[in-house]
Amino acid sequence: MTPIEQVMRTAPVIPVLVIDDVAEAEPLARALVAGGLTVLEVTLRTPAALDAIRAMKKVKGAIVGAGTVTNEKQLDDAIRAGAEFIVSPGLTKPLGKAAIRSGVPFLPGIANAGDIMRGLELGLSEFKFFPAMAAGGIPALKALAAPFGQVKFCPTGGITLDNAPEWLALDPVLCVGGSWVAPRGGTPEQIEQLARDAAALPR
């Protein structure tokens, strides 16, 4: 099992987190971990993201990674901040090679067969299917997975508590990514319950 596959198998849902205020990071991580979601993806979409990764790593049991990593500088910054895995919305050879060189578990985004083939050429076999719903949903993923039996996926983009079970029922799907478990403005109690519901999803 590859290191990124181990991360993907930890929980059925990886929360996709957009954090505006670093003060929110540690309480958010505590609530998610308490609810059973220990793998946390902090997207590099805000100025607070790198400090949020550092803060969340203080929470016992949290496996904190960086998402929306699109270039080598962001990769380096995220690793220096302590990111334990890296998620990218797409896959370029420079970023893929840099991630592989670094040794960090890496989950690049794919949306078509060409993307998957590029990843396989780099030695990668686990991918984020993104944007999952906009890219054709479950029928698209089934069609993409058919020629690539060794490949595993984490669909992200438009996944909800209601449709997550359909995705998780697919053999090549190890987990899903979702932002619904950490809505902006949610209280720690609300987020812990959302995490609990997500962690209980069957796979």
Image (cartoon, rainbow, N blue to C red):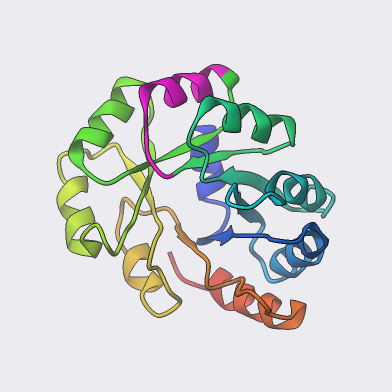
Q: Which of 101 and 168 is in front in this view?
A: 101
Task: Name the residue: 33% across, 29% down.
Answer: 119
Q: Position of residue 86 (x, y in %)?
A: 56, 38
Does residue 5 appear left or right of residue 157 in this picture? right
Q: Residue at x 61, y 78 (%)?
A: 194
The magenta span reads 89-101
As drawn, the residue found furthest toward the top would be 101
Quadrant of residue 21 within the rendered picture? bottom right
User: Is residue 167 on the magenta stretch?
Assistant: no
Q: Please count the marks in the image.
A: 0
Residue 134 in picture, x, y percent from top left = 27, 62
Q: Is residue 182 left or right of residue 110?
A: right
Question: Which of the pair 182/150 is nearer the observer?
Answer: 182
Q: Is residue 13 left or right of residue 119?
A: right
For residue 112, side relative to residue 93 (left or right): left
Residue drawn at (58%, 51%), measured in percent from left and top?
Answer: 45
Q: Where is residue 5 in the image (x, y as percent from the top left)?
A: 49, 41
In the depicted structure, whether residue 154 falls above or below residue 151: below
Please, what is the dominant secondary structure of the magenta stretch? helix
Q: Nearer the viewer, residue 143 or 77?
A: 77
